[in-house]
Image (cartoon, rainbow, N blue to C red):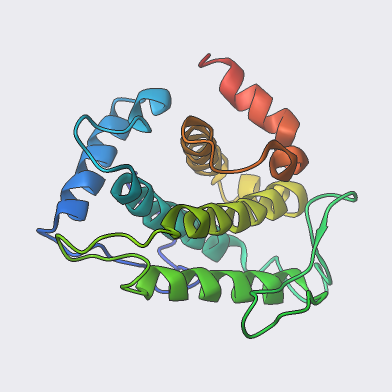
Amino acid sequence: MGVGSRSSKTFKPKKNIPEGSHQYELLKHAEATLGSGNLRMAVILPEGEDLNEWVAVNTVDFFNQINMLYGTITDFCTEESCPVMSAGPKYEYHWADGTNIKKPIKCSAPKYIDYLMTWVQDQLDDETLFPSKIGVPFPKNFMSVAKTILKRLFRVYAHIYHQHFDPVIQLQEEAHLNTSFKHFIFFVQEFNLIDRKELAPLQELIEKLTSKDR
């Protein structure tokens, strides 16, 4: 995805995959397949590759994409405009991470997304969860951690679509947002990583974006 003239402001620092590592090669493979324009094909596990590693590389990539997309609209997502973290009138999210904040708290969208992205960043930086060195095994609970990360990242997409789509159009980010989200959805569908009920806030959009590629 070329950045072009797009604002390079990210919400949190970009998470880099070390150059020369096997994960970097996987990321390059993913980018090359994406370049073909066929997102369904781009998410398929490359032959002979480890599923955990493929999920890890793509999770880092989605974090970076959402980080950049949200970074473009932070001026519009404020305590005043978004006093609660919602995705339309029917869906409201309260934050808990199970360690620092055990009981879910109601907070503004910018606060929630800050908690969420900081939490994701901490998981991605944890070498015991996301090992970057060759030969270091992934932990047994890796897939459940990845599922929680992706479930939470989905909520940022849902919030942007429901509450901030007008600024996205004004900033001419619509195609970028749609492509990123479509790639994300194909990925989580391919490996069954997010429960259908969690995707409900954007179900109509998901059907619209994915129906052309069935």
The residue nearer to you, when weighing 148 against 29, is 148
In the picture as drawn, the residue positioned furthest to the bottom comes out as: 100
**Position of residue 120 measured from the top left corner of the image (x, y, whole percent):** 50, 68
Residue depicted at 47% across the width and 31% down the height: 190
> Which quarter of the figure is the N terminus placed in?
top left
Apparent side of residue 103 relative to residue 214 in the rendered image (left or right): right
Q: Position of residue 199 (x, y in %)?
A: 69, 41
- The x and y percentages for residue 156 are 63, 57
Q: Residue furthest front?
A: 140
Up the image or down, 212 lies above or below 91; here it is above
Residue found 50% across the figure and 60% down from its top: 145
Residue at horizontal 76 percent and vertical 48 percent from the top: 162
> 25 left or right of 142?
left
Q: Residue furthest left?
A: 20
Residue 45, picture quadrant: top left
Work out whether residue 89 can be spotted.
yes
- Asked if residue 66 is positioned above or below residue 41 in the image, the reply reads below
Can see residue 6?
no
Residue 162 appears left or right of 145: right
- Name which quarter of the figure residue 49 lies in: top left
Instruction: From the top left corner, tell me how far across and down residue 136 is, in percent.
Output: 20, 64
Q: How many marks?
A: 0
The answer to whether residue 78 is left or right of residue 113 is right
